[in-house]
Every structure is written in structure tokens, then in C-alpha cells.
Image (cartoon, rainbow, N blue to C red):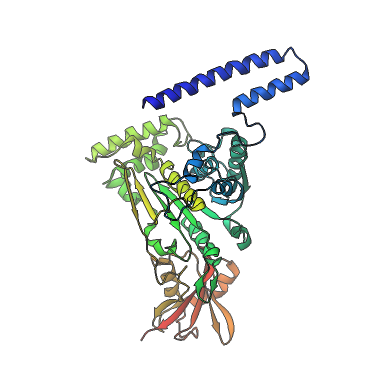
Amino acid sequence: FYSLLFREKKRRKIEELTEKLVTKCLKLAAALSCTVRYILFSVCRMAVDGGHGDSGDWDGRWNHVKKFLERPGPFTHPDFEPSIESLGFLLETCKILVIGAGGLGCELLKNLALSGFRHIHVVDMDTIDISNLNRQFLFRPNNVGRPKADVAADFVNNRIPGCKVVPHFNKIQDFDESFYRQFHIIVCGLDSIIARRWMNGMLISLLSYNDGVLDPSSIIPLIDGGTEGFKGNARVILPGMTACIDCTLALYPPQINFPMCTIASMPRLPEHCVEYVRMLQWPKDEPFGEGVGLDGDNPEHIQWVFQRAHERAADYNITGVTYRLTQGEEHHTVTTSACSTEVFKMASSAYIPLNNYLVFNDVDGLYTYTFEAERKENCSACSQVPQDLQFPPSAKLQEVLEYLTENASLQMKSPAITATLEGKNKTLYLQTVASIEERTRPNLCKTLKELGLSDGQELAVADITTPQTVLFKLKLTS
């Protein structure tokens, strides 16, 4: 503690002296020639930025990273050999793709850039909203309306010398295999399960096999992080080797929406009381004036909601309404720190990576737990085996469609079903194109027998959750 205190005092003293030096130099420059002014300005700039000038590096800049890469330790990987080349790989060669530039993405970009990764790409399809500013710290009020990827990249590039973040204001679906194949590691900071599954499917599609044996060089590790309220998770996925996103689809529960009748008439949980005030009492009372909406970043608004929710909870003998619950804030730091650490471990091979799923919870105290998620032998994404669909011949195509969307292991969103009949591909149902949906809608009321489908028939199903077509084998039961 005293050592840290001493270093902090020393740092502050240096900053104070630097500020005085800069002030004196600028005053002196006002009375001198242009040439001398330029020299003094350069000195001032070197004093402020640590002496690196335009080179991007300075003596001792990467000492904190070298300590992990250039010496052995009790926690290093058994096969790790310390060397000076490892740092060179991080600085000059390793390419990282960050998907998402929101709450998680901002933290990830900052952590990775400060850890020595200089070649980073970031993909995000969103623009900055004023509600983002309280937690997405790379953005400022004058950035509202601009693409998140562009602003985040500009901020990191200007702040961290030598770092080159390339922004992409796009959807992940806008890029093909050649784009994703260029990266050594991909790290996701997404709030969409559909996007996670699509990215998972893309990396699986990049795998190559020689005589049925997976080629390790075709594997691009996926580091995935997610948060919801006071809970979070981080995981390491080696496509084709470890459990993928679809293998553990049941771990992603559906979004909880409280029934309005419960909120209004029969509250049982503290969340019911908070939602009542947010959804019903705020619009009715308009506590801050007519037409003023609830701003989750305004402390006065949150305090009002908290007080009203606390009063309603007391009326129904409900406990647990807290200011923290009312805020509904999300904690990104722990999750992104874990993800960034895993990226560093993967890129340097210095430490054994996470195996393979970390959960984090600080609702009441602090809790973390790591376990190994297991691959599913019949995973629709990574098993390379057609899935069995068991239905009687009298089942209607509508039942098959409902199974694809409601089954916990599939959870498709808008499946398009195609089969080969009489040597020709026939679309049985497709709902994403209005004209084709209208033409194929009558098939939903037909039985599998009426559609000409037989036992062992292969059905090809396309969905927005994956870039690949998923094959199913129809098993007709008696």
C-alpha cells in the first residue's frame, strides 16, 4: 500500500513539474522566431506524451508486457518458451477482429490496444445515441448520430500511438469468408444471440478437413463475452474442437418480459414494482413536465423511480427494491477484462486458455465460476452430421416449422425449408421474401406425405442464425 502511495505521489509531482515546464516554454516561445517556436513545441509535446514523438514507441513502453513474454513463471503454459519474438508478433503481425463497439466493445478496444495489439478491426452497424454516453466511454456528446465503429477507431488511434484500428460501419453479414479468414482471433462484444450464432457458423464454415481430420491451421479462435444486468460470461471457443455457441444454446434464456396484468395488479417481485413505475406511473404522473421521457442516465429521474417503486413495494410487503436494481445498469469491466486476457493468452501462447466458460455474478456479493461446456455430438452447427427430424407422414409442414423455431437446441427465427423432389430443388416454405412466402404458404397446411416427402429425405434449412445451410434427415414414424 505504501509503495503504491509513494508511486502515486511521485507521478503527481512529475505531472506538476511537466505542466510548469510546458507553461514556461510556451510563454518563452511567444517572443521567439518560428524555428525556435517549433523546437520548443516539440519539447513540450515530448514532455506530455512521454518522449515518443512520432515513432509510436519509447523506452520501457512495453515492459509490462515483456514481463509476461520474456520470462518463465509458475502459471505459464508447460510448452511456453520465453522469447523476444513473442512481443514482435503482437505488435507487428497479430490481427484481431472486435465485433461490436458498444459497452463491451469500447472496453475491449481499449484493453487490446494497451496490451500491444496494433492491428485491430472493429465491426458495428449502430450509430451513437445519447443514452450510450454514460458507459461507452470512447464517445462524446458531439459524436451522437455518428457510427460507433468510426468514432471508437478514431479515439483509440489518436490516443494510443502506433495502434491502427480499422472501422467497419457494417453488419457482420456484409462480409464473406475472405474477410474473416485474415484474422488470427475474433472477439465478440454483442448483445444479439442471432449475431453470435451467425458468427459461430461463419467460423465453422472456414474449417477444412483432410481425410476427415480437422486442419488446426484453419481454426480461428472465438472469444465471446456477454452481460445482462449484474451478470456476465466469457468463453473461449475453438471451432471444430470445443463446444460452440449452438452446442450451448440452452444457456441463453429468452428475454424476460413481465406480464402487464402482474405488474399492475399482482406484483410479487421487486422488479415488478420498478417496471410498474417505469411503464405506468411515469407516463401518468409526468413528474418532470409534460412530454419529458424517462432518462435512465439522469440521477434525478432514477431517484424518483426508486422512491415510487420503494413505496409500491411497501404496500405489497415486497423487499429488495434498491437503487442499484432501479438503475438496471450493466457491468462490462469484469467480462471484458476476462475476454481481453484470453485474447492475450491465445495470441502469445504464454498461458493455458480458459477451459472454457466463465460465469460472473455480482447481484449479491461477488461470484465467479468456470466450467467446461461440452460439445454436442448432434449439434446442428458443428457436428457435420445431418440432424434427424422425426414426424409421422400425417404431420403438416407447419408442425415442422414450429419444431425448428421452438426446439431449445435449434431456436431458428425464420427458417426456409427446401427439398429435392423428382431431381429438382423445391422451396417448401420461405417467409423472408413476401412474394415467395405468399406462394409457398399453402404448403404449411399440407402433410409431409402430400408434399411428396419420403423417409430418409434430406431437408435443407436456411436461417438468419447461420450463414450455412443446415441439413436435416426426415425420419417418418408410423
Q: Is residue 257 left or right of residue 433?
A: left
In the picture shown, does residue 68 fall above or below 250? above
As rendered, which of 401 and 166 lies closer to the eye?
Answer: 166
Residue 330 visible: no
Q: Position of residue 419 (x, y in %)?
A: 53, 79
Residue 220 visible: yes
The residue sitting at 29% across, 40% down in the picture is 365
Q: Position of residue 160 (x, y in %)?
A: 59, 37
The residue sitting at 42% across, 77% down in the picture is 388
| Residue 276 image-quadrant placement | top left
Q: Position of residue 138 (x, y in %)?
A: 55, 37
As rendered, which of 390 and 33 lies closer to the eye?
Answer: 33
Q: Position of residue 249 (x, y in %)?
A: 40, 62
Quarter placement of the N terminus: top left
| Residue 475 image-quadrant placement | bottom left
Identity of the residue furthest to the left in this view: 317
In the picture shown, does residue 329 fall above or below 409? above
In the picture shown, does residue 135 fall above or below 442? above
The residue sitting at 40% across, 37% down in the picture is 282
Quarter placement of the C terminus: bottom left
The number of callouts visible is 0
Q: Is residue 375 left or right of residue 364?
A: right
In the picture shown, does residue 14 fall above or below 326? above
